[in-house]
Amino acid sequence: MVERILVVEDELVLRETLTYNLEKQGYMVSAVANGNDAVTLAEQENPDLILLDVMLPGIDGFEVCRILRQETNAPIIILTARDDEVDKVVGLELGADDYLTKPFSMRELLARVKAQLRRMRLLREELAPDEDDTTRDRLSLGDLVLDTKRREILWKGELVSFKPKEYELLVYLARHTGRVLSRDQLLEDVWGWDYVGGSRTVDVHVRWLREKIEEDPANPTRIVTVRGVGYRFEA
Ligand code: CA
């Protein structure tokens, strides 16, 4: 399967360099120069990965990221030019999967792209096992039912909607019920991140999940905090 990459970059030279190098690696590349086109094209082409510049004419990369995150769980790698943009990428819960600071080497970029695509393939296998393995399609844990085939989650018999990352995290936690999972492990397996400071992302997503599937989010019994380490999912 040829993987599709959407490149969003307004600088012509960089856009063409990225396109050229990614195509040389065998990816199918679509490139656009502004945020509006990015949103439109992402909806039409459903890319496997998105490279997204921050400073764009029209709606900026942050806003594009926020919009796309609601619609796709394809990895989004942000391309930033300034340190304060990095702070924003890391600090705000934009749902980006990784970022690169300009200037970056093409080798570094290709490595990150490859890592994200690999992570998605593994995750897909984890979340959607073989067709005949029906026992893994539906996980019933008391008042919580996860149907990974239909990507649906029921809590107390009601369908609950989740953002893509929330969904992935919850399924991952549920599949590792009873095990202590460190923030780093969750980051690596669910986000594919390995940089310092990223673990706050895990905490924020856990907080969101608790609001959706805990009787009393302030005193969780489902996603339990393991002090100093991370979290444990209770059946
Ligand atoms: Ca730019």
Image (spheres, grey):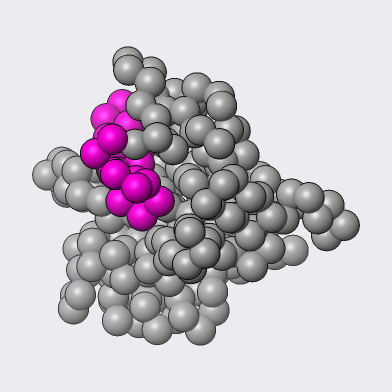
- Residue 29 x %, y %: 54, 69
Q: Which residue lies at the image location 87% right of the left edge and 57% below the top edge?
A: 132
- Residue 31 x %, y %: 44, 73
Give the camera-side residue of 232 and 125: 232
Query: Does residue 18 show up?
Result: no
> Toward which corner of the image does residue 197 lie, by quadrant?
top left
Q: Which residue lies at the image location 32% right of the left edge and 17% below the top edge?
A: 227
Would residue 215 be counted in the magenta stretch?
A: yes
Quarter holding the N terminus is bottom right
Q: Which residue lies at the image location 46% right of the left edge and 80% below the top edge?
A: 43
Against 139, residue 58 (above or below) is below
What residue span does the magenta drawing correspond to?
196-219
Answer with left or right where residue 115 lies relative to residue 86.
Answer: right
Give the camera-side residue of 152 and 184: 152
Q: Please, which residue is most extreme toward the left here?
A: 84
Query: Does residue 94 show up?
Result: yes
Give the camera-side residue of 142 and 13: 142
Quarter holding the C terminus is top right
Q: Which residue lies at the image location 57% right of the left edge and 47% below the top edge?
A: 142
